[in-house]
Structures are given as structure tokens and as C-alpha cells.
Image (cartoon, rainbow, N blue to C red):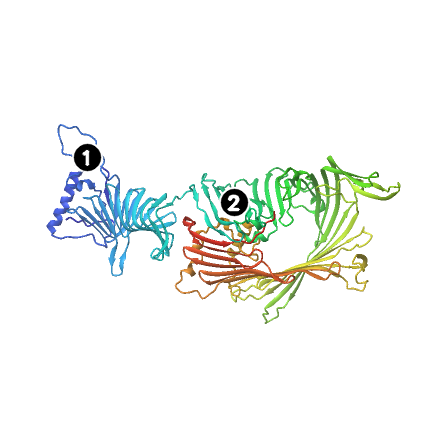
Amino acid sequence: MAFQKPSHTFTKIHLKGLRTNSLHILFTLSFTVLINTFSSAQETSKKKTAIPADSTAIPAIVIPIDTLKSKPSNIKEVDSTEKDSVKKDAFLTDIVTYKAKDYVAINQRKQQIRLYNEAKVDYGDMVITSGVIVIDYSKNLVYAGRIKDSTGYSQKPVFKQGANVIEPDSIVFSTETRKALIYNSVTEQSGGTVIAERTKRENDSVYFISQGKFTTSENLEDPEYYILMNRAKIVPNKKIVTGMSQMYIYDVPTPIAIPFAYFPMSKKQTSGIIFPSFGEDTGNDRGYFLQNGGYYFAISDYMDLAVLGDYYTNGSYGVRLESNYAVRYKFRGNVGFRYENLLNSERGFPDFSQSTIYNIRWSHSQDAKSNPNSRFSASVNLGSSQYYQQSINQINQNSFLNNTLASSVSYSKTFQTEPQVNLSLTATHSQNTNTEDINLTLPTMQASMSRVFPFAPKSGVKKGAIQNINFQVNTRGEYRINTTDSLFGKSEMFDDALAGMRHSIPVTTNFKLFNHFSVSTSANFEETWTLKTVRRFFDQNTQAEVTLDRNGFDRFLTYNFSSSIGTTLYGMYNFEKKGKDPKIQAIRHVMRPSISYTVTPAFDQYYETYDVIDADGTTSDQVEYTRFENSLFGRPGNNYSSSIGLALGNNIEAKVRSKDSTKTEPEKVFLLNNLNFSTAYNLAADSLNISPVRVSGGTQILNKKMSVNFGMTLNPYALDSNNNLIDRFNIDNGGSLFRLTSANLNISYSLNNDSFSSKGRDDDEDKDSQRRAANSNSRTDDLFGKSEDFADRRLTDKDRNKDDEEENNEFYNYKMPWNLRLAFATNYSNTTRQNEITSQSLMFSGDVELSPRWSIGASSGYDFLNQGFTFTQLRFERDLLSWRMNFTWVPFSNRSSWNFFIGIKSNLLKDLKYDQRRQPDQRVGN
């Protein structure tokens, strides 16, 4: 055996087959002389050595492994009668690079190279790292295994080829056939992990395993569940095909077994079948059902489509289309359509009923950088008014309690001219699910020109009233449809449609007066176009008023003038005294009073009159009307108005000593965020000149955890005995200075386990709740319950990273995370001496984590006026590592229902679940 003390930390073996016999023989002879020289030196010294661990250098040697054989397969004896020819390449066609930390030993007799401690071999696109690696070039094999020490085994082999990684206990690899035997391997496949006792690598793309385990658990030493596969074929990143497979939970076999299985493992979008969930609908006697089954179409890298369906044994069915699309750096969005044909009970029964409902959703957003001067966006949510109340596939509690559906599709374009011009087209939809009224604008066109300062200097700051004169040009056109749910989509919905356009030119200026007062003056000119007017007259023959619609273009012009003056007053009171450092150092009061004057002429030229004539020919009345009374933008006013407005805004803040002793600057705290008063006096009115005083205010207390907002209306005029408003002050009628006619109070309070410490609520929680609300068209808080979308119940892997530090702690966290949200609202009305509270309720929602993986929650409220609980929802959630278990329960009301769900988190096995529920007992009318 010959050993060499190296001078470099790696050795290279050149394995590319020689192309000609002559070159091959030359290299063979050269290497033989080199090896014999080292052998003779070693035999003379009678000393057998290995490369020491502390070697700092091992010489690089390029060795054609073929020549180390007694008779290389690609070399034949020289025959003078044969001509030289190019022979087939040897089995090794690339460079092998190997290294080790402790030593590299070359055994010429056994034709082996042994690498020990942190050994590594590179061959083409394959890399093997291990504690021990033996290269047997006589058999064209590479052995890799662990190192055994006093603590057990360490440095398990890691076999990498491209993106595939296998971590076995040991491996035998043939460099000639490129096949391998792998023992106790662990490899990741598209989010899942395959653990196999014995694996045979057939080629680059096919592996065969026996007694393999497939799991998505993170704890590979003791997975909480796995699917045991007797035999399986693996095509990396494409598929796994197995024979008999059975699920085990903590090594306990379960009755869940299948004779064969197919696991798609592609990392790209792939079309395939979506397996349905099944169950029984006992609440509405629809029988057994299959839900959310269908087919997924991977149309392209930019778009997909899922076609899903539901079927109930009583004949009810539903269809759902869901599509997502995205182009990076340009736009993204999703489209959804849902249709359900619902049958309650059985045909022929007295309680049988049938209804069809649908819902359309579309969301589209454009990357702001894709085209700064042009933007298109869409947010559509329209459909049957009773969709969320009657849908049996989706129960979204937030949307169920929301009585409005809204949509908007808009396109805007900015023309970078001087002055700049903005153009936008918007189609909107608003639907009241209680009244089933639908309002549409198809579309709304708006165009505006940026402000123009005709008298401004070409350079420098604009000064004075003249230089600040500016004007704009705005245009707005609409085509508006008011219809109902029953007429939507039919030609009758266009019968009462209105079209119109309004042009406005506001002219404004502003300037300073005495350096302390801000003065602004404006005049607004508006011209309204309409395509439909009316003509009214009294028919003496029928003794009735007649109104005729007239189609055709018409217009009217209006204008008004306004001016305002305001200032800001500051008041400061300091509590600081020499030698003292009070907690409250100063209080500042800011007042913003303003006075405005507005004058609007009477446009009598657009009004006409007709006489009401009795049967005897006498005129009993004279009626005034305008032909523009049904105009889209309203009618011109026929009352002269000249009014003075008064307003006063206040806010009060304090400077307090910081609780942090390291801070030298005091902290600013708002005592009263705003307190506003406003009223007006109409100079042109004959009576009731003073408008009611409106008061509004709000503040935040308890470290900004509690928000308080209030408002009230104070009327200075009195009521007569019939509760009619009279032109007499309330104080002159024996009452107070003002009469409280209405008031409202709203208080919200949010706190959690960190509310009383230096930490506050995590901002991510607020953002997540707002994101959920935006997607579900509901509130940002959970006062009306959390969304439960059974039609698309899919759990993701994002929860795995939740609170990793706490969940991985061996000891129980002494903190018990919790959060609570409260909202109190009350309204008072006393317009006609009714002196009643029209509504008063307290809503609350909270969650408690009993342990790092156990949480419970509830959402409810109490209506003090009707003396009953509002919509109530109870929630239970258990994080089972790779699984999740949820239970939601609505214990009472006509929406009483419950849902139990347990399933695997990973999207790879998302269809491996159990879902049981009881639907609300709905009764749909015929």
C-alpha cells in the first residue's frame, strides 16, 4: 500500500476518458512510474503513514482512475495490423474532487481512497458529504457513512444532485451505472418529507423505496403522523406512486388505508381533480351532500381556474368558478362566480320551497409603477340580496350581518400637459340587502383641469389676493339606474334611468389679513345638462294633474358666492415651578374660530306655474314647478339664501413627565382631540333664521386604548302643543336656552395581556384583521364574529412560524395571551318631545390562549333596548402541530349552527380532513 503526505487540502482525480490508445498508454505508463516511485520509497522506509489531521497542505494530483485497474476496459493490446481509432469514453466523464478534514488515504492494493471526518466528494452535479467516504475505483463504487463516537453517530451523509437532497444513514453509489442504494434516507419533496429504510436510485429521475414514511411534520425524529408506504416509486418534484398505504398517528396505525395512492409533487401549477368533502345537511332536510369537488385548470403561469360544484340528494346543487391571475410588476386579481339552486324539504311536501341565488366577485389591482399616468382597479361584490343569508356553502358571519353590497370599477388617465388634465371613468354599484334596492352608475365620467393662476408671477411666491386668484374646470357625467333585485338584468331596469352632465368652474383666492387672519373667497359657476325634463298641467276634464316626460337636451345655470375668515388662538398654562418637577408640566388649548358668508340667488326663471281649476271653472290653487325637477343633479333653487356661518374648533393637550427616567423631553398627551361647534344664521329667511347648533367631539384615553366619540344637536326654537316647530325661542317659551333634539355616544376599548406593560398590541394583528375585513366586506374588528368560509376552507403553512420562540420552549410560558374588544353605542332622539333612546347596545369579542396551542374565543353583545343578546359566536381552536382543529358554534338565534373541522395544515395534503357541520335552519319563501 502506498500513502502520500499531501501538501494541499484537496485532491483532484481526472476521470474523462482518453480519446486515443496512444495517449491513454502514455498517461498510464507515466502514472505507473509515479506510483511505483512512491511505493518504493514507502517500502524502503518500512513506515506506513496516513495524511495527518493537522496537515496544512495536500498536493493536487490529477489521476486517471481508469489506469489504476490492472486492465483498463477502454484499452486494448497494441496490434500492428490495426489502425489507431477513437474508442468509447470511459464510464467516468467528469472530474472528481474530494477532500477530508482528518486524512485522505490511498490504498493502491485495494484500489481505494478513504476520506475521514467532514469528507466531501464532487462529481459532476452530484455532491456527497459525510463523516466517512470510501472510493473503490476497482468496483466503481463510492461508500458514504456516519462516524461513530462516544456520543453515538454523527456526520450523516448528505447526497445532493441538483435540487434534490437526500440525508441517509449510509449510501452506496456506482459511478459507472450512476445507481445507488440508500439506507434510512430523509428527503424533502415539494413541502413533504419522505423517510425510507431502503431506497434504490435507478437514475436521475426515478427512486424506488420500501417501508417509506411520508409526512409534513417538522419533527422528523418523532413525527406526529405519517403515511406508511410498503413500496413506492418517486419521481422527484413530479409525483409519488405507492402501493398499500396506511396512516399512522404517533406510530399507532389507524383504519385509514388505501390500496394505492398518487401524490402529485410538482413545484409548478398542475391541472388536476379537486376531491369533494361529504356530509349530511340535517338542518334543512337536504340529505347527504358532496361539496367543493371539481377540477383545477393550470391555464398558464399567469392564470388559473377552479371549477367546483356541490350536490345534495334532495336535488339542490351549486356551481362555483374561481380564477386568479397575475403579471409581475403589472397587475394581479381574482374573479369568482357562485350560483346555487336551493330546494328546501322534498317536492310535494307543504314546506317545500325553491330559490336561486348568485354572487359575483372581482378584485383587480395594478402595480403603481407599471404605468404612473394610467391606472385601472376593480372591487366588485354583487349578486342576490339574500345570498349571504341563504347560501349553504358559505357562512360568512360578518357579511351576513352587513346589509350593503358595493362595487366599483374605475379607470383613470393623467395627461401631463400644462395645465394637467385628469380623466376617469367609474362604474359603481350599491345594493341594500334588506330593501333589495340597487343603484348603478354605468358609468360616471369625470374630467378636471388643474388649477390655473392667471395673475401669478413667473417666479417667486404668490402674494396678495390678486396673485392668488385661481380657477379650475370640472366636468362630471353620469348614467344612473335605480332598480330592484327582481328587475336586475332585465330590460325594465332601464325604464327610469337618468343621464346628465354637470360643468363647474370654481374661482377662488386667499390672502392674509393683519398677518393673523386667513381670508378665502370663492365663486362657483355650475351648468347642468339633462336629457329628460317634465311638463305638468291640470286636466280640467279629468280633474287631475298630468305629468308628461319630455326627452331632449336642456340645461340650466346656477352660481353662488362665499367667503370666510379664520384664525388660530393658542393658550398655554405652565405648572412648572422653580425646584419642582410636576407630572403635568403644561396644558395647551388651541381654538380655531371662523366666520363664513354664503349667498345663493333664486333662479325663478326656471320655474313655471299652472292653475288648478274646479269643475265650476273657478281657480282654486296655483302650483309652481320646474321642468328640471327630475334632473340627475337636482333642481335649481328658487329661494334666495344669504347666511352667515359660525364655527369653532378646539383641542386640548398636555405635556407630562415621561415615565421613562432616561428621557429628558416631556411627552405630549391629547386630553381632547377635538370639540367642534357650528351653526348658521339665514339673513334672507322670514322666520327660523338660526340653524340648530351642532356639537361633536372625541378623545382617546387609557393610553389610547379607549376611544370616545360623541355628538349632539341643540335647537334654539320651541315646539307648540302639537310638537310643531314655531318661530319662538325655547327660552322665551319657558324652557332652557337650547333644546336637545338628538345625541349619540360611541365608546370602543381594545386591550390585551400587554396593555398594562410597555408592550402594546401587535400591529400585525390590526393589519391582519383589516385585511380580512377588506376581503369579506365586513368590519375590521371581530364584534360580529370571525369569518368562516366553508366553501373554500383551506389551511396554509403560515401558522408554522407563529410564535416559534414560545412554542419551541421546553417550559410552559407563564403568560396567557388574551385580547378583548368592547364597543358601546347609544343614540338619543327628542325631536318631537319623544325623549327616547332609540338604540343602545354593548358588543364584545375576545380570544384567550389557554396554552401555546389552545385558544378559545367569543363574540357577542347585548341590546339594552330590546333586552336580548345580539349575534353570538363561540370559537375553539387547537393547533395540533401538523394538524389544526377548529370548532365554531352559534348557540342561539335563527342562525343557530355549528361547524367542526380537523385537517392537515399543509396544502400538499389539504384534502385529508374531516369536516362536520350543522347549517342554520333556513326557510326560503317561494
Camera-near label (2 vs 1) is: 2
Where is 191 relative to 83, above or below? below
Q: Which amino acid does label 2 sit on?
A: Tyr
* Residue 918: x %, y % from top left: 51, 54
Q: Can residue 629 be seen in this view?
A: yes
Q: What element carries label 1?
A: helix
- Per the model, the C-alpha gap separating discs 2 and 1 is 78 Å
Q: What element carries label 2?
A: strand
Q: Name the residue that disc number 1 marks.
A: 23
The residue under label 2 is 317
Instruction: From the viewer's side, name the closer residue of 923 and 559.
Output: 923
Left/right placement of residue 248 relative to residue 849 reads: left
Mark 2 Cα within 10 Å, few/some/many (few <14, many 20+)?
many
Q: Where does the image place residue 359, in percent across and percent down from the top left?
A: 56, 45
For this view, does 680 lie left or right of residue 768?
A: right
Q: Where is residue 875 in the image (x, y as percent from the top left)?
A: 51, 59
